[in-house]
Amino acid sequence: MPIISIIIPLFNKERFIKDTLNSVLRQTFLDYEIIIINDGSNDNSMYIISHFNDKRITVYSNLNNGVSHARNFGISKSNSDLIALLDGDDIWEPNHLENLYSLYKNFPNCGLYATAYNKKYFNGRNIKCKFNGISSNHFGIIDDYFSASIKDGIAWTSAVLIPKITFDKIGMFDEEMRSGQDTDMWIRIALKKTIAFSAIISSTKIILAPKYHLSYSKNRIDRLKLFKKHIEISESNDSLRKFMDLNRFSVAIERNEAKDYSNYKLLANAIKPSSLNLKQRLLLNLPSILITLLKRVQNLLLRFNIYVSPFK
């Protein structure tokens, strides 16, 4: 039985899946299986996968039921007690599984293990993620997951290891959510279990264009369900409340830009002003035409390797 099962949901990633799989096969930690769930791809993704000849790779094909269903299905087919998640357009450094497994061996009773990661926009330079109150050499338990995640999230889907027993206690990914289901999972785990984190960067989130990333799909509006699910507990947990308000801020900005003013106002009015910094409060009250302009400027700057964010 392999020590780690790697679950890769796949939907139309022909431009990326070869590099993603090669990054897995270059791992220094070798005791793993790879479970790919083809979620109804209609491009050349499956043709590209067919050229990989490695007995550790198993492929299942389903209808396009969404990433939550694909992950849950892959977990159900896994043969390991530890689950590593990887999206079909992200990259692991060769030490990534070793990094995660070292966390697990040193802190064996946690509900989730996470590593630091880079973001790479438009084939530019790597941008280090920043975590609130976490030192550059941190290796161990996170005292407050929500407070640590108000800049960049401690947990990111392609940089986590989850014991299968966690899913037994917390539940699986919510298949009724087509967006935000990963954030929902991290919240549920953080409320019930401890989380360990390694500040060693061992993976990269590749962001080329909105159409290539699941989180920027037409289902983005589904994130509204996230706030409804956790509204009661967030009212009695200050750090979770701020974390949720910052997520509301992100979605409110998107709804404003999309001219979905009813949901924009609903989200904006639900945010506690003290949860936001001055830059965020100013952005929240700008008209949609200026938000669109600022987004274009932000994307232009990213192409010149200049990263500007309201969370920094």
Image (cartoon, rainbow, N blue to C red):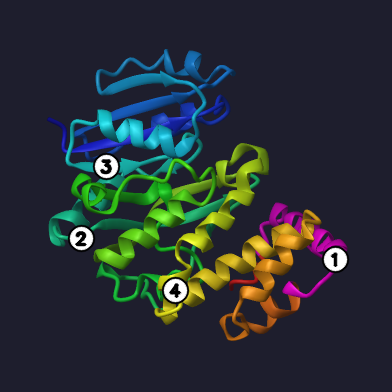
| 299 vs 154: above or below | above
Please, what is the dominant secondary structure of the magenta stretch? helix
Marks 4 and 3 in Cβ contact (< 8 Å): no
Residue picked out by circle 4: 234
| 37 vs 85: above or below | above
If you read the primary sequence from the N terminus, does the residue marked by circle 4 or circle 3 appear first? 3
Q: Residue at x 24, y 31 (%)?
A: 78
Mark 3 is surrounded, within 10 Å at the Cα level, by few (under 14), some (14 to 19) or many (20 or more) other residues, namely many
Residue picked out by circle 1: 290
Locate residue 258, reporting x and y percent. 78, 53
Q: Quick check: can you spot residue 106? A: yes
Q: Which mark is residue 83?
A: 3
Three-letter residue code for mark 1: Leu
If you read the primary sequence from the N terminus, does the residue marked by circle 3 or circle 2 appear first? 3
Mark 2 is surrounded, within 10 Å at the Cα level, by few (under 14), some (14 to 19) or many (20 or more) other residues, namely some
If you read the primary sequence from the N terminus, does the residue marked by circle 2 or circle 4 appear first? 2
Q: Which mark is residue 110?
A: 2
Mark 4 is surrounded, within 10 Å at the Cα level, by few (under 14), some (14 to 19) or many (20 or more) other residues, namely some
Q: Quadrant of residue 92?
A: top left
Kindly give the residue lying farthest to the bottom in the view shown.
Answer: 274
What kind of element bears circle 1? Answer: helix
